[in-house]
Structures are given as C-alpha cells and as structure tokens.
Image (cartoon, helix red, strand yellow):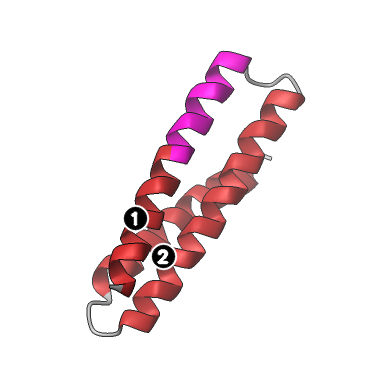
Amino acid sequence: MKKNLQEELFNLIRLLNSYIVNRDSSRIREKHIKNFIVSLSMVDYYFEYLYLTKIISFKKCKDLVDNVITIRKLAYGVLKNEKE
C-alpha cells in the first residue's frame, strides 16, 4: 500500500511537471491535467482505505482528504481556464 501511494504521488508530480513544461499544445496540456485529476482520485481512495484499515486516524484522513479536495478544485479551475 505504501509503495502504491508513493508511486501515485510521484505520478502527480510528473503529470504536473509535464503540464507546466508543455506550453505548445493545449490538447497535451489538457490531457495531462485530466490525468492529474484521475490520479488525485486514486490518492483520495488510498487515504480512505488507510482510514478504513485503521492505519490513520479520522482526523488525519479528514485533513488529507480536504487537501486533496482543494487541489482537485484548483485543477478543475485550471482545466476550465484552459478551455476558454
């Protein structure tokens, strides 16, 4: 589980970096930000799984999920801004 979560977090960083670097094509940037949102959903799932298996407390899970929700809202805002 720890390895999967680490890989997903590294994937988030890679996708965000790819989004920033690819300034030329809006379709490629849109693809990267959509994949970033999907990856955020997996991170959210992992956090909830850690809570259900009693590895992390409710408070820690709530804090982590709130951060993921905030990042997801920002990503949707960037995606909406890209389409305009």
| Disc sitting over residue 33 in the figure | 2
Horizontal relation, residue 74 to residue 4: left or right: left
| Disc sitting over residue 77 in the figure | 1
The magenta stretch is: 57-69
Q: Earlier in the sequence, mark 2 or mark 1?
A: 2
Question: Is residue 2 something one can see in this rendering?
Answer: no
Question: Is residue 1 something one can see in this rendering?
Answer: yes
The x and y percentages for residue 47 are 61, 34
Choose between 65 and 18: the one closer to the eye. Answer: 65
Q: Residue at x 42, y 70 (%)?
A: 32
Dot 1 amino acid type: Gly
On screen, residue 54 above or below 20 = above
- What quarter of the picture does the N terminus occupy? top right
Choose between 14 and 84: the one closer to the eye. Answer: 84
Dot 2 amino acid type: Ile
Q: Residue at x 47, y 39 (%)?
A: 69
On screen, residue 10 above or below 21 = above
Q: Are marks 2 and 1 in contact (CB under 8 Å)?
A: no
The x and y percentages for residue 80 are 35, 64
Q: Residue at x 55, y 23 (%)?
A: 62
Local SS, label 1: helix
